[in-house]
Image (spheres, grey):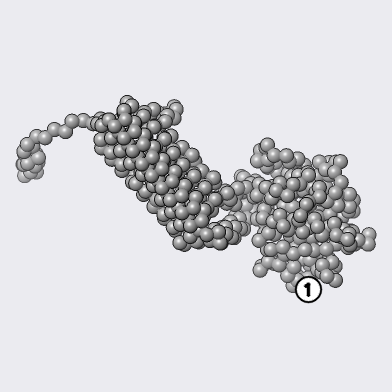
Amino acid sequence: MQMREFAVVILAAGQGTRMRSDTHKVLHPIADKPMLLHLLDTVDGLGATRRVVVVGKGRDQVEAALAGREVATALQAEQRGTGHAVQQAEDALEGFEGPVVVLYGDTPFVTPETLTRMLGRLCAHDNPAVVVLASSPADAKSYGRVILGEGDRISKMVEFKDANEAERAVRLCNSGMMAAMKGDLFDWLGKVGNDNAAGEFYLPDVVMVAADEGRHSVAIEGEAFETAGVNSRRELADLEHDWQQRRRARALDEGATLVDPDSVWFSHDTKLGRDATIEPHVVFGPGVEIADGATIRAFCHIEGASIAGGCEVGPFARLRPGAVMEESSKVGNFVEMKKTRLGKGAKANHLTYLGDAEIGAKANIGAGTITCNYDGFGKYRTQIGEGAFIGSNSALVAPVSIGDGAIVGAGSVVTKNVEADELAIARGEQRGLKGWAARFRERQKAKKG
């Protein structure tokens, strides 16, 4: 559907006291992305003409998170309710005429399809005053209720604390999200009163103000997941859980194998190919791309890494940002990579740290090898050529280069470049003192006796 111009106002001025956190509520992450940015990415994808975020306490944090985005902010200095909060966005919308969608920074997962439905319904032939997004969650809790009349027309909206028993028994709940034409919205907000249990100016009351002027409002229903908000750490964890469950289901539907789906944790941008196999207890941080047919074994942590087809990772491996595994390469148990490219068919099977390195095709990195990339002040790179063999327990002190086909003897500390096909051994000469061990034992026994 081709969208007409529309504006979005996102409320993010609440204090979030129940989060008990120094971090602003809307900046708490789900799937490694702040809730507010989840919502803004959805809005951006739909092509909103104007975006206004209403801020209050903790505004510096929110404004810092918005840096570089085409988003205006408006300040609600005094917390006087959601209706009052939306009013603060009026100046930022000067010169805009058209639909305005009001959203909440702590309700991040309303879908583009639902927003499209809201805007389409607002512009329908019967010219509704307000379109309200509602849902029917399994636990209605203390949400405001939406009382319907004929069809989708709203007869009444009431906050839970102001509702009677019959109204509280209604399962259709107000999400707080709504759409209205800009001129109508701010006109009706100016007529909303605060004669209620909290003494606040409620945004949903514009529905009743419009009704007093002979205009009808309607409700559309979305999934409970879309309207789930976060006011506490427990609700944050619940929403993370729900998001992860949906992402796991998508991975399975797209052709990946998750051996134990509930133990795999995705980031918001994880890319997982077909026939990839993910064993239990794998965590993906941001920026991970896994190609078709790769295998991630149990207990791996992967972030900012690219893994090509046919690769094998783990178990118990850690790939940090900048790790690149080319086709059919392998890292095994207790291997860590950072800013390192492992060439096609190369292997690092055990107990190895590879940082700031370029490793050629079919190179073999022995157990216990480390690239010593940091001297306390700067980072330096290690170059390992194609087909090179690095013996176990070697330390490669960067900057250093190991040529194609070279061999580094086990236990070496390499501080100079190694030429192609050269054998490099850098360790103390082994000496043997015949009979020394037996004489030592005799001396010790004599001391004890």
Give the residue displayed 50% in from the left and 61% down from the top.
Answer: 262
- For label 1, count other residues whose C-alpha is less than 10 Å away and answer few (under 14), some (14-19) or many (20+): few
Quadrant (top left, top right, bottom left, bottom right) of the N terminus? bottom right
Left or right position of 318 against 180: left
Q: Position of residue 93 (x, y in %)?
A: 83, 43
Identify which residue, 304 or 72, lies in the foreground: 304
Left or right position of 155 against 384: right
Q: Position of residue 422 (x, y in %)?
A: 27, 30
Q: Position of residue 386 (x, y in %)?
A: 36, 36
Evaluate whether residue 138 shows in this view. yes
Give the residue displayed 62% in from the left and 52% down from the top.
Answer: 19
Q: Which residue is disc 1 drawn over? A: 166
Q: Position of residue 60 (x, y in %)?
A: 68, 38
Give the residue displayed 52% in from the left and 47% down from the top.
Answer: 288
Q: Amino acid at mark 1?
A: Ala
Quadrant (top left, top right, bottom left, bottom right) of the C terminus? top left
Give the residue displayed 39% in from the left and 37% down from the top.
Answer: 359
Identify which residue, 352 or 142, lies in the foreground: 352
Label 1 SS? helix
Q: Residue 202, located in which quarter of the rendered image?
A: bottom right
Counting labels gives 1
Evaluate whether residue 142 shows in this view. no
User: Relative to residue 253, is residue 326 depicted above or below?
Assistant: above
Q: Name, please, the residue furthest toward the right.
A: 213
User: Relative to residue 402, is residue 205 depicted above or below?
Assistant: below
Left or right position of 411 against 318: left
